[in-house]
Image: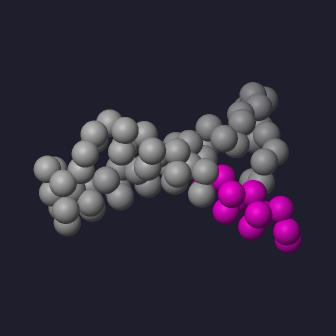
């Protein structure tokens, strides 16, 4: 996939949209695991934590796909 556009039915979709959806799913998984292990009280400012986790995971997924798929 890399960082090139994806054509679906003649419509070009940015790969960042796909990476963001993957990051959102990963955020929900990591967040639910952390809430089971740590609990709800231990996390300060849950909204800031959630958005930071989403950004970190989306950037990591983008970096991994860009580097792994760019070098065949």
Q: Residue at x 14, y 50 (%)?
A: 41
**Image location of residue 27, percent across then percent down:** 41, 50
**Image location of residue 9, percent across then percent down:** 73, 32
Query: Can the viewer see residue 69 in this picture?
Result: yes
**Image location of residue 29, percent across then percent down:** 35, 56
Q: Residue most toward the top? A: 11
Q: Residue at x 52, y 51 (%)?
A: 56
Residue 44 shown left or right of residue 72 in the figure: left
Q: Residue at x 25, y 45 (%)?
A: 44
User: Does the stretch in magenta take in 67?
Assistant: yes
- The answer to whether residue 12 is above or below residue 34 is above
Residue 18 shown left or right of residue 67 in the figure: left
Query: Can the viewer see residue 22 in this picture?
Result: no
Image quarter where the N terminus lies is: bottom right
Residue 69 shown left or right of residue 40 in the figure: right
Prevailing secondary structure of the magenta residues: helix
**Image location of residue 12, percent across then percent down:** 76, 31
Find the magenta span and give its range.
61-72
Image quarter where the C terminus lies is: bottom right
Instruction: Name the quadrant containing residue 47.
Output: top left
Q: Residue at x 56, y 49 (%)?
A: 58
- The answer to whether residue 34 is above or below residue 18 is below
């Amino acid at each position: 996939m890399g960082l090139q556009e994806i054509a679906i039915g003649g419509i070009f979709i940015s790969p960042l949209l796909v990476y963001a959806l993957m990051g959102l799913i990963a955020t929900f998984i990591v967040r639910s695991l952390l809430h089971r292990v740590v609990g709800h009280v231990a996390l300060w400012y849950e909204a800031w934590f959630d958005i930071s986790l989403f950004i970190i995971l989306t950037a990591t997924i983008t970096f991994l796909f860009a580097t792994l798929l760019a070098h065949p």
